[in-house]
Image (spheres, grey):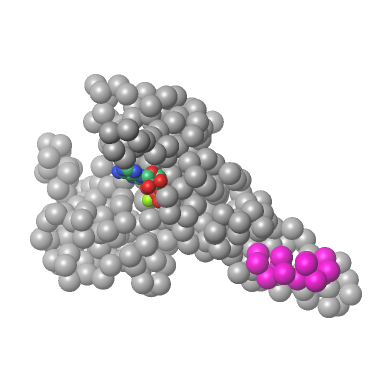
Amino acid sequence: MENIIDVQNISYSYSVDETRRVQALHNISLQVPRGQFLAILGHNGSGKSTLSKHFNAILLPESGEVRAMGIDTRDEAHLYDIRRHIGMVFQNPDNQIVATIVEEDVAFALENMGVPTAEIRRRVDEALKAVGMYDFRKRPPHHLSGGQKQRVAIAGVLAMQPDCIVLDEPTAMLDPRGRREVLATLQNLHAQGVTVVLITHFMDEAVQTDRVVVMERGDIILDGAPREVFSNISLLQSVGLDVPQTAELSHELEKCGIKLPRGLLTVNELADALAGLLEGSHCPSSKSNM
Ligand code: ADP
Ligand code: MG
């Protein structure tokens, strides 16, 4: 399977002052296959942003190697290609919006790239439709809600036709409705084949992805399907992370001696398992309707 991002044994440290450095990444390896929806979890300071900035050469590794679309991120001649293929969205939508009209904002990078006008029109319309913001194309961005602004920022990246979109806590500043809008947008892009890397500290968002990587102090401590990762309740809690409520309740019930299948994630799965126990029959195999 083709890896969009291939991180091999990278380490990175920041200099704090003339004599001291803080080690932010310790010998990390990570492959992101094309089409995957990957969540990176971890509490503040665990190295998530530092790692993600290596994906498109915002940072270069001190040791080890990062390949984006097969290109070594140290290769300056291909910097532009790397940045076009691996798009980034950050936490604060206000810092990412530059124009005074939504569609102009989405067109901004394309104009700088010298894309022909008709092609810009087509790509901007397509990107705005993909994030559900086409009807707002003539509006000033500062009148939009946080979730809407963040979707415009995502459209700006999509207009570049990236292979992968990396979002560093894009919902951290949003209200619950804005978070739902952004998550639904990402699900939709993933369904259309876009590779998505979502850095988040919301468990309910991570649960909706294909794969969850958990970072702690510059290391990857868990990596797997959400069901596997969230069954490590004690480990997650020991590094200060919440766990999905269903997983936590299952864990508490198990401590009371109630035998449940591993990896229950949705309310319906837990309800089915408990109903099965109450009827005195075996627990039904988990039917996912996340
Ligand atoms: P996260 O995104 O998971 O919160 P970061 O990648 O931002 O983590 O930070 C990892 C470590 O690197 C932390 O110890 C943090 O304090 C340190 N760090 C991050 N950015 C800088 C910086 N610009 N200068 C010095 N230290 C930094
Ligand atoms: Mg961060």
Q: Relative to residue 289, is residue 261 drawn left or right? A: right
What is the chief secondary structure element of the magenta stretch? helix
At a point 31% along the width and 40% down the height, the residue shown is 16
Q: In which quarter of the image is residue 231?
A: bottom right
Q: Which residue is outermost to the bottom?
A: 278
In reply to whether residue 72 is colored magenta, the answer given is no
Q: Can residue 261 be seen in this view?
A: yes
Is residue 3 in view?
no
Q: Quadrant of residue 102?
A: bottom left
Number of numbered callouts drawn: 0
* Residue for point 49% across, 45% down: 217
Q: Quadrant of the C terminus?
A: bottom right
Judge whether residue 248 is colored magenta. yes
- What segment is highlighted magenta in the picture? 247-259
Across and down, in percent, residue 149 comes to: 25, 63
State the residue at coordinates (83%, 73%): 277
Q: Where is residue 111 in the image (x, y as percent from the top left)?
A: 12, 42
Query: Which residue does the image show at 12% across and 40% down from the upper left?
Result: 112
Asked which quadrant contains residue 237, the reply is: bottom right
